[in-house]
Image (spheres, rainbow, N blue to C red):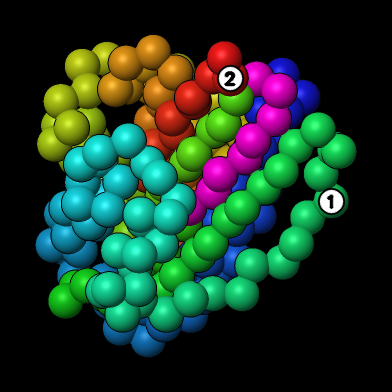
Amino acid sequence: MRNISVFCSVLFSIANAAVGASAEETHVLPIPKNHEQALINAFEIMCNLEPPNLDRLAERATAMRMQPQDVAPLNLPSNLTLRRKAWNGKLTTGPFSFLVDETSGPMGTITTCAIASSVPDVNAFRGEVMRELRLSTEPQPTFLGGHRAFIFKNFQGDGSGLVIEDLTPSGQPSVMIKLSSLKKSN
């Protein structure tokens, strides 16, 4: 459980930095209403077509000419290794951040793919994600790293999860849709 906790704190630090960059770009102009749908489409294409794989997703981001973000190294327990990458992307409706992490340890490898951006209404966006991804029941919110999060377990089967996280405490109304997949060690 400690490994999962360390992993979550790593991802939250990346997301906060990434959304901060996106928020600066979107602060001047209002966010178009169709930005929410564009973000869901980006998530579907970048994260949900196949199980997340850091190397393939990095190739995809490079092919799409997304701008890499600097990602600060973290101190992790000696039994964990972390590879993480982040990019800034632009949709016709506005900017977003694309984040990929791969954490390996004794339990296996957790790969996470996420899209983060500012949205006009966090709650309406969560409802739209639930409709688009056909998520039937909304779980009770939990707090991860100080942010309200809705966790859908076994989203793509055993060992996967989907998190819709409210990053609004970082300033402007912002969200992250995150898909995590665990590949257990043999």
Disc with the residue nearer the chain's start (2 vs 1):
1
Quadrant of the image containing the N terminus: top right
Of the pair 82 and 185, the residue shown nearer to us: 185
- Is residue 12 rendered to the left or right of residue 38? right
- Is residue 165 rendered to the left or right of residue 145? left
Residue beneath the point at 47% across and 41% down: 112
Of the pair 33 and 103, the residue shown nearer to us: 103
Above or below: residue 131 compared with residue 128: above
Quadrant of the image containing the C terminus: top right
Farthest residue, direction front = 186
Label 1 packing within 10 angstroms: few (<14), some (14-19), many (20+)? few
Q: Which mark is residue 185?
A: 2
- Which residue range is magenta in the image? 100-107
Farthest residue, direction bottom = 28
In the picture of the structure, the residue carrying the numbered disc 1 is: 75
Of the pair 160 and 14, the residue shown nearer to us: 160
Residue beneath the point at 32% across and 35% down: 51
Which of discs 2 and 1 lies nearer the camera? The answer is 2
Residue beneath the point at 62% across and 40% down: 103
Q: Secondary structure at mark 2?
A: loop
Q: Label 2 sits on what residue type? A: Ser
Above or below: residue 39 compared with residue 97: above
Magenta: main secondary structure? strand
| Cα separation between marks 2 and 1 | 23 Å
Q: Label 1 sits on what residue type? A: Asn
Image location (x, y in percent) of residue 34: 13, 62
Above or below: residue 151 compared with residue 41: above
Q: Secondary structure at mark 1?
A: loop
Above or below: residue 172 compared with residue 80: below
